[in-house]
Image: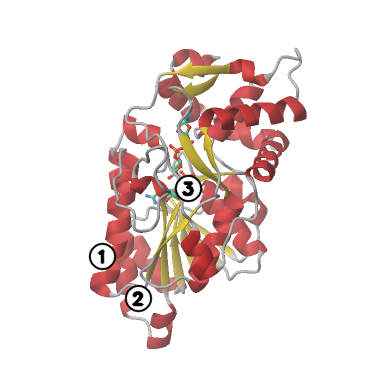
Amino acid sequence: MIFVTGGAGFIGSNFVLDWLAGGGEPVLNLDKLTYAGNLANLASLQGDARHRFVQGDIGDTALLERLLAEHRPRAVVNFAAESHVDRSIHGPGEFIQTNVVGTFRLLEAVRQYWQALPATEKEAFRLLHVSTDEVYGTLAPDAPAFTEQHVVEPNSPYSASKAASDHLVRAWHHTYGLPVLTTNCSNNYGPYHFPEKLIPLMIVNALAGKPLPVYGDGMQIRDWLYVGDHCGAIRRVLQAGRVGETYNIGGWNEMPNIEIVRTVCALLDELRPRADGQPYASQIAYVQDRPGHDRRYAIDARKIERELGWRPAETFATGIRKTVQWYLDHPDWVAQVQSGAYRDWVATQYGAAAARA
Ligand code: NAD
Ligand code: DAU
């Protein structure tokens, strides 16, 4: 079996669903179920003996030791993290706790387990750490995209905590020989994306008739990758990645935020037009910028293509259409995640009026 952490979050739950749909081995799924973890994402696996869910913290050494000894996984895939940049600005403590201390505890527990494995299992074992392109910092408009050799220059508490975790993973390989793989991926989008992040926030706000808050001038650039493609890349790295290496994963799709928002609006105009016939883009509202906002990310994903033959299957046009349609088809999921805690977050980030609107 494989041991997945953070498998009730956005990417983790997509990964578990894809993995089992593709006939992969059973999954042990450890997730703390923070505000971002949601068992409804995994509802289709109810009664499926191949999925074993445990609520718990990657920082809980005793729990990790027990689970590893009991289930004897052949691999660990670490998705568990605090993942939202804006939340890291309001409260960085949890980011240090989970992303740095939690990753350290996980590495230590996995190291003890791995060291005691019989030779053949020890040789085959892998720990794959899922990280982000944000560790590289920001790019000038004409600078080449991030390669795996790019200097690590994180700018937010979130990206600094992820960079710290990447360094720990690297050191556990270099010092102890732990067979690790690290992936640094660009912005994901797709089903089960929590509506604190740009694309799902725009979809749910648009449909609710609320303002669409665009930070600053909206000309910040991100590279966008459909989540199913990210899951495929992780499977490929786990299968054939070279131990100790890092692999950048991206969609070859750099776009300014305002263009993303206008694309979402245009799709909604087509698929669910407003009752008054007005375009959803009329709801766009420029708001105060994110402090320390990185201007541009771009991923050079040639290494994973050259070494492992992976390229994204979706274009942005196909992926974003599927995504908008998924949100239109799943109003119950959207209603469920917009709990009291979600409204508290909206009030903190966008003001009390936005939470009431
Ligand atoms: P998410 O916030 O949707 O999910 C994180 C999951 O981790 C949640 O289910 C949460 O309950 C769980 N979790 C948090 N703290 C935990 C702890 N201490 N112990 C166990 N579980 C815990 O995040 P996501 O967008 O799915 O991101 C998953 C991973 O991928 C993260 O490591 C993130 O840094 C990385 N990443 C995300 C993106 C993106 O665009 N979303 C891009 C590149 C990399
Ligand atoms: O690059 C990978 C990273 O992508 C991941 O490591 C993070 O976990 C993930 O959250 C994401 O980080 P971003 O900060 O890029 O994502 P977010 O969706 O929060 O914002 C995307 C862009 O949109 C960013 O430039 C900020 C802007 N934005 C965001 C929100 C929530 C707005 O303009 N308005 C908003 O309301």
Q: Secondary structure at mark 3?
A: loop
Instruction: Tell which of 135 and 40 is nearer to you.
Output: 135
Q: Residue at x 47, y 36 (%)?
A: 221
CA gap, disc 2 to disc 3? 30 Å
Residue at numbered disc 2: 114
Q: Which residue appears at 34% of the width and 67% of the height? A: 65
- x then y, percent, for residue 52: 54, 62
SS assignment at label 2: helix
- Amino acid on which disc 2 is placed: Trp
Asked if one can make out residue 68 in the rendered structure from this viewpoint, the answer is: yes
Give the side of residue 178 with respect to residue 273, left or right.
left
> Does 220 sit above or below residue 29?
above
Give the secondary structure at mark 1. Answer: helix
Q: Is residue 237 above or below residue 260?
A: below
Q: Is residue 61 visible?
A: no
Q: Badge 1 is on which residue?
A: 171
